[in-house]
Amino acid sequence: VRFDTYVVNTILLLFLQRVLLLVASDVDALCACKILQALFQCDHVQYTLVPVSGWQELETAFLEHKDQFKYFVLINCGANVDLLEILQPEEDTFFFVCDSHRPINVVNVYNETQIKLLVKPDDDLDVPAYDDIFRDEEEEEEESEAESDGSEPSDKRRRFEEVCFFCFSLKRNKIMRALCSSILSFYLNDMLWWAIVGLTDQWVQDKITQMKYVTDIGILQRHVSRHNHRNEDEENSLSIDCMRIAFEYDLRLALYQHWSLYESLCNTSYTSANLKLWSVQGQKRLQEFLADMGLPLKQVKQKFNSMDISLKENLKEMIEESASKFGMKDLRVQTFSIHFGFKNKFLASDIVYATASLMESIEKEGPETTNFIKALDSLSRGNLDKLHQGLDLAKKQLRAIQQTVASCICTNLVISQGPFLYCSLMEGTPDVRLFSKPVSLCLLSKYLLKSFVCSTKNKRCKLLPLIMAAPMDVEQGTVIMVGIPPETESSDKKNFFGRAFEKAAESTNSRTLHNHFDMSIFHVLVIELKTEDRSKFLDALISLLS
């Protein structure tokens, strides 16, 4: 795949004054932001960076800055709504939207003046013809008169409403694909690494399929090989040694190189679910698994870096061979690692977990943007202290997730509501504050659904989606609720909760807030809801989906 330079060049050529950069609070967006920041610095483009975590903050940021700026860059936000209708900008205001969320609003696709969607020119958007969606005013008036007479709306009108409501489902396209052209132009390893981390975040969050991940890994591997080859020239070799990226097959174990192997096995969703570690029998299987590898318990329970070198030399092969015997055939995964000198080595997934944990830290330290700035800084090679802080937070988060999963399964908190599974965390649950954040709750929901599918004998329940709720703000009396698609090997995962959530809220007058950027039919849907409205909202949802 060739990365076209049109995207970056368009931005740099049109920006004749200071730019406002609106960046969503997710790892993928941070990586794209780092790439843009590097490009702006190279071309001396002045910009102001404003983090936005939802639609309300996006609107507020625009209103506060619209008089000072004419050019706005939106990263991982704005594509799936009608921006002009929501923001009501002046005609001389321009938006450059670089967003991985789907579906993209079809109005944005056809706006050729104020909105520029930053996608590759050769991307197959499969957009219907303009005349099939937008009609002239006379035709609208005729149909309006016909409807006022009590007649049924025409097929064309019905199609128009359907397309406008659901926007338009486009093929998945990561934001890094739009910006990756800069890597070839500037030959900067930093940019290549941020692209890798962005891709890995998409995979960790289940926003892309395994097949898509492997395909894009292959593309990035060619760039990694070209930009990280050894040169006989001593000076060049030294610079590469300071920061070197390598492709490798590694273990699908979270943070194991910065943890103990035992802790990683216990707190990785894939191994925990397959071994059923929440049960006594599962703990026995873990001991059998370690014994089959011939690894002493004393070795696997100490820090990975402290393990005997003789054991670590063939560790990957030993684990992979034994994992196959225990039904874990996908424990090896294609990934990239980065070396800072000779001491520090990190996998791309390590960076994803660390950065996400920093961004959703519940520790109060200064203004609300503190977590965003820390997470952004952790992606720079000069801020290893913040990266290590993020790794520590990520370990706490993964422990909390697995303990909560075990508790939910052992106490039968996951219940079938007919068309979906439902689980609710009560105030007072250990570590419940961690799950008041959307990314953390989404991770918990996915881990819980995977574990529940492995534990239940009910074949029907294995095919159901999951809705999970957790306290968000006790003082305001709100809960955060996520809906995720069924746990299936199919690459065609669809999330149909979006419209159902809206209808359930409307029919019961439930006070909900759809403030999160992800409104995808491919991923997770997140809403905020008043606690006292939860029961009637769920009843309406069951009725709608039954």
Image: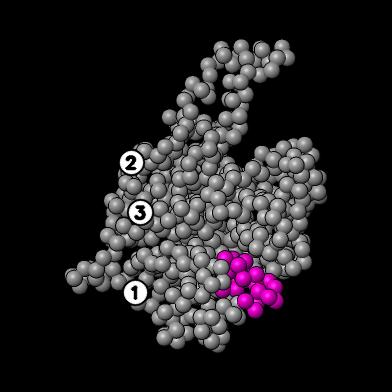
Residue depicted at 30% across the width and 72% down the height: 241
Of mark 1 and mark 3, the one earlier in the sequence is 3
Q: Which colour scheme is used?
A: one colour
Residue to which mark 3 is pinned: 219
Q: Which of 330 and 312 lies nearest the eye of the viewer? A: 330
Figure disc tally: 3
Residue depicted at 73% across the width and 41% down the height: 545
Does the magenta run of residues contain 282? yes
Q: What residue type is labelled 2?
A: Tyr
> Real-space Cα distance between discs 2 and 3?
19 Å
Q: Please name which of the two marks, 2 or 3, marks the residue nearer to the observer.
A: 3
Number of the label disc, if any, that sits on residue 341: 1
Residue depicted at 62% across the width and 15% down the height: 143
Q: Which of 49 and 473 lies nearest the eye of the viewer? A: 473
Main SS category, magenta section: helix
Answer with left or right where residue 340 lies relative to residue 350.
Answer: left
Q: Which of 417 and 254 lies nearest the eye of the viewer? A: 417
> Real-space Cα distance between discs 1 and 3?
25 Å
- Tell me which segment is drawn in magenta: 265-285
Residue to which mark 2 is pinned: 6
